[in-house]
Image (cartoon, coloured by chain):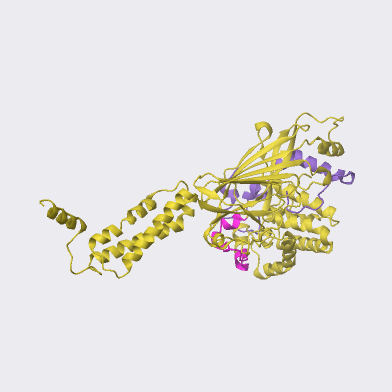
Amino acid sequence: MLLAPPAEYQGLRRRVVDQFTIVSANRCQLARSINWGPLDGLLNSIVPGTGRLDTAGRLPPEVCLLLPISTLPKRALVGFDLVGPGGSDAHLMPYGTSVAIQGNLIALLAEAAGCPLPGPARRVVDAISRFRPGRLSGNLPRLAPRGDRPLSFEAVRTYLDAEADLVVPAPTLRSWQELLEPAQTLLGRALDEPFDPLSSADTLLLAVGELWRDPDVPTPLEIGHIEYYLREFTTWIDELSLAGAAATPVLSTVAEYGRRWEALAAVIVDPYRPCLIKMKEERRTILARRHPVRDGQVPVRQRWLTPVALVDIDPGGPGSYHVSIGTDDSSIELSTPITVDLWHRRIARTYVEDVHGNREVYAFYSTDARRAARARLVVGLSVSPDVWRVAAAIGILMSLTVALSALPFQLGADAVAVVAVPSSFAATVLLTRERSSLAAWVLGPTKQALLALLVALAVLSGLRALGWHTPPDEPASSIMSGQAQETGRRGPG
Amino acid sequence: MPKNYGAGVAGGAARVGGLRSFVRLGRRELWVRLDRNMIAGARKEPAGRPSAGPSSPAELAPGS
């Protein structure tokens, strides 16, 4: 009920605060805190109804509850930390628990939509939740598709054989694929997110390999049994599709649990007080050299020259949502983020209410429930002016130097030595180590250009030393020797 | 929470029976519920199924 709260309980999850810190070019730390209101009203409506406990109008001072933390993408957790109310222990529930709860939620949603989930179809729904893409991409990396291309038929067959111990004849597997394709299309349309080949709802055959892991599936699991489960599932999806808009939340939730899962924390709370749960996690920093938004509102300079970081946020659900984005590296500056959907289309209305922005941190706050449930922030990254001014000045000097050396002027060896002076500055910039890998990544193209100019200058200086366009009349004279001769002439006089 | 959960689900009087089993599940089973490949039985070779291979979690972590 806390995962899909009805109107009367929507105020229970009061506030979610997300703090993203881009630590380096590869790591981004997320600190999330979830503020729950007093849960006594909800518990008083559930607990007496079960008949297990006579609360006599008053709940115990401490109750153990499973509270949802976040809907996380299916990948290994890195640097995960969970703290319960008042610094107490909070236990992340086993994955099997999340699978069971997700199945219960889908069953309740389906019942509310008027299409109850039959038992055999529930086995497939649980299998979709249970599949983890790492089983394929971690154990059989050569089968993992590149980009958003769908998994090939042979890759699925090899996966089922190697990882699920399921040898399915090719004609049978092909018939299952044909059977599941309409359901896949319906689920994809309801979720309305980009295709993910390793989502078990987008490639339903991947979920077939999870059926035998279900404790409620009879052993041994024969090919005929699997087909029975799949037929029951597709029949249920067909029934849902006839229910119209009422079925969209059910289909969308089934599709979502193919790519994400509910992290649930077991915590001990006082039901009469609000509580705070804190979570920390490390995510991968997604960086791009070019701006992913291709509309006319993004200035040309920003579109082609400013690298960006993409941060996935899930502001959905009731209550207020706060998010802040910053970096650990003070030499990096952030521009005002653009909120886009998962297709990289600009979201027209973001329902932001308060904003705080400076060069290092950007934060906003929204309480409007109409805000997008899943979104992405595109944050422009640049180096601070003290760094880019020096890099630009040296870049211009080096370009002039290389141009002067490359043009067929006749320059003496001394002139070449003087002209090549900026190369020492360029070498200094190249040898300086940046404060973080993020700054190194942002400055990467500038440094590459400086390195190319330095190499070009070294080659041209070498050519000139060998005699290319050297003045023939003064091969041995130098500035210093010329000055010495002048001084010598003036001295005695 | 899911991206789109519609009007949500309520615990009305009609679902008390369902809630009873749900709470029972929550008290004990959710902690001890394991996949079939996480329990000792998974180590046995089921009839008609080829060997699980070295990458099987049951073989990698016996007793887990």
**Where's residue A364, x and y in %?**
66, 46
- Residue A365 found in image quarter: top right
Q: Colour of chain A?
A: yellow
Question: x%, y% of residue A5?
Answer: 79, 46
Magenta residues, start to end: A133-157
Depth check, front residue: A141 or A474: A474
What residue appears at the point 63 percent right and 39 percent down from the top-left corner? A82
Q: Is residue A407 above or below residue A385?
A: below
Q: Which residue is drawn at the image coordinates 46% and 48% (left, top)?
A: A386
Q: Nearer the viewer, residue A253 or B16?
A: A253
Residue drawn at the location 89% of the way across and 46% of the way down:
B14
- Of all chains in the rendering, the one displayed in purple is B
Q: Residue at x 79, y 40 (%)?
A: B24
Q: Is residue B64 above or below residue A207?
A: above
As drawn, is A455 to the left or to the right of A307? left
Residue A385 falls left or right of residue A281: left
